[in-house]
Image (cartoon, rainbow, N blue to C red):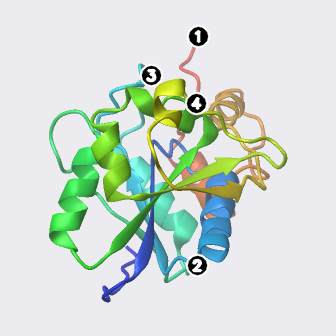
Amino acid sequence: MNTAPAAAGRRIGLFGGSFDPVHRGHVALAHEAMDRLALDGVRWVPVGQPWQKARALSAPEHRVAMLEAAIDGEARFAVDRIELDRPGPSYTLDTVRELQRREPDMRWVLLIGADQYAGLHTWNGWRELLARVELAVAARPGVAPVADAELARHPHALALVPLAVDVSATEIRRRAASGLDITELVPPQVARYIDQHALYRAAPGS
């Protein structure tokens, strides 16, 4: 598992998600955020119990293994099991509070998608969350992210990160279930892991 040494004043991107599976779009976004926002590293946080997702996720050990395979060789990236190891729903605010207690010298930059930004006003404790982190939103080139009116009225700094590679995890799972090639959509080591463990395969007769 990748680790990144702590240092005072470091700016670290906080990149959460189901990562089911992690794909080329995720990796490209993390690199783009590193460059655009002058980050010292990116902390990848696979969700434990997503409170806004009805679909059952793959087992945590599979999602962590795929993440570690995807970021292998990039010393500035690290996987953090903080949400997997914490019981109850995975609220980003709880994660940020715990990280700030654990690593008080870090400055956290929360990386989210445009769809998450649009629904940020529904997140648990979103006002406190915005006070604790810098916010960076991944957006398609030429398409400005839109906030709900309640969020727009709340002062917050916002950085944009171009979404250079647009990949859908839903499409990857669909293709894998149908036995179709996914090597252009995920890092090669992730494709091998999915194949070796028969992830996302359709059940016989389904």
Q: How far apart are marks 3 and 2 (CA)?
A: 35 Å
Q: Choose top left, top right, bottom left or bottom right for residue 44.
A: bottom left
Q: Are marks 2 and 4 in contact (CB under 8 Å)?
A: no
Tell me residue 164's x, y (percent): 78, 56
Q: How many residues crowd around disc 3 within 10 Å: few (fewer than 14), some, or many (20 or more)?
A: few
* SS under mark 2: loop
The circle on residue 55 is: 3
- Mark sitting on residue 201: 4
Say which amino acid is labelled 1. Gly
Q: Which amino acid does label 2 sit on?
A: Ala
Where disc 1 sits, the SS reads loop
Mark 2 residue crowding within 10 angstroms, few (<14) / some (14–19) / many (20+): few
Residue positioned 64% across, 28% down in the render: 177
Q: Residue at x 33, y 53 (%)?
A: 131
Name the foreground residue: 2 vs 153. Answer: 153
Q: Give whichever of discs 2 and 4 has the lower sequence position.
A: 2
Residue 183 badge: none
Question: Which disc, if any, is residue 205?
Answer: 1
